[in-house]
Image (tube, rainbow, N blue to C red):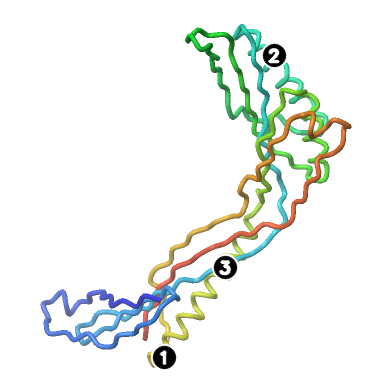
Amino acid sequence: MNISLRRTWGPLAAAGVVGAVLTGVLLGSGSGASVAAIGSDGARDTVSVAGTGKVSGVPDVLRLDLGVEHTGKDVNVALNAANRDVTAIKKALGRFDVKDADIQTSQLSINPHYENNGKVNGYEVFQGLTVKLRDLPKAGEAISAAAQAGGNATRIHGVAFDIEDNAKLVQAARDAAFADAKAKAEQYAKLAGRRLGNVTTISEQTSYDGEPIPYAVMAEDTAAAGSSVPLEAGSQQVSVNSNVAWELV
């Protein structure tokens, strides 16, 4: 906890009153609170405290990062092969009601291969897609179907669960963060022999779980027998950190 002295000048200071005396210093660590101790110059006393609220929910969408990779002596041959595989993957995903709006091209690269003498002896083409799978019970089947459609050229780089409809979770986490901050501020006010007045400032930071899970797989490893890729959605946390300042009365 870092406790600092902070002053908000009032009308007496603006009029030129001098000789104010700051009194009262609190020391500690770990709570993120600051207290402004004020003298007789009319400045306001404030206490600023950080509060945290965390709420868990069930993910409602899965983001899939996949693509196809082809090599060939001619760049057009490699590119056309990648195009065919991507088209087949999109068609396979369509059988699981994946809409076009939930399929986005994320990468397209064409890189030459060189011989030791520096001459180009072929090209490598990669086309990547980012796909939102909203029917989570069928997400594993959809991934397997996409891998089969792309064949041995399929590359799956990762999956990440997310809570797209998280407005209620954020609101609940915000309520909890404010309550946490207020409880701390009330404790400091009581220790100082004061009460909380009006809120003077509020700021917040919001964070979510949902980092991509590496899932580097080739088609022959994922769907050789047409089996569904095993996936568990689990739960995901939404966190809100609020910084709130109150007047002390």
In 3D space, how far apart are the residues under numbered discs 2 and 3 (Cα atoms)? 50 Å
Q: Amino acid at mark 1?
A: Leu
Q: Secondary structure at mark 2?
A: helix
Q: Circle 1 is placed at which residue position?
A: 191
In 3D space, how far apart are the residues under numbered discs 1 and 2 (Cα atoms)? 73 Å
Report x, y in % for residue 170. 60, 60
Q: Quadrant of the N terminus?
A: bottom left
Q: Are marks 1 and 3 in contact (CB under 8 Å)?
A: no
x 28%, y 75%: residue: 6
Choose the circle earlier in sequence order: 1 or 2: 2
Q: Secondary structure at mark 3?
A: strand
- Between label 1 and label 2, give the one nearer the viewer: 2
Report x, y in % for residue 100. 70, 29
Choose the circle earlier in sequence order: 2 or 3: 3
Report x, y in % for residue 110. 56, 17
Q: Are marks 1 and 2 in contact (CB under 8 Å)?
A: no
In 3D space, how far apart are the residues under numbered discs 1 and 3 (Cα atoms)? 24 Å
Instruction: Point out the residue furthest to the front here.
Output: 116
Q: Return the mark for residue 53.
A: 3
Q: Circle 2 is placed at which residue position?
A: 81
The answer to whether residue 145 is above or below residue 183 is above
Report x, y in % for residue 98. 75, 33
Q: Amino acid at mark 2?
A: Ala
Q: Residue 67 or 219: which is nearer the viewer?
A: 219
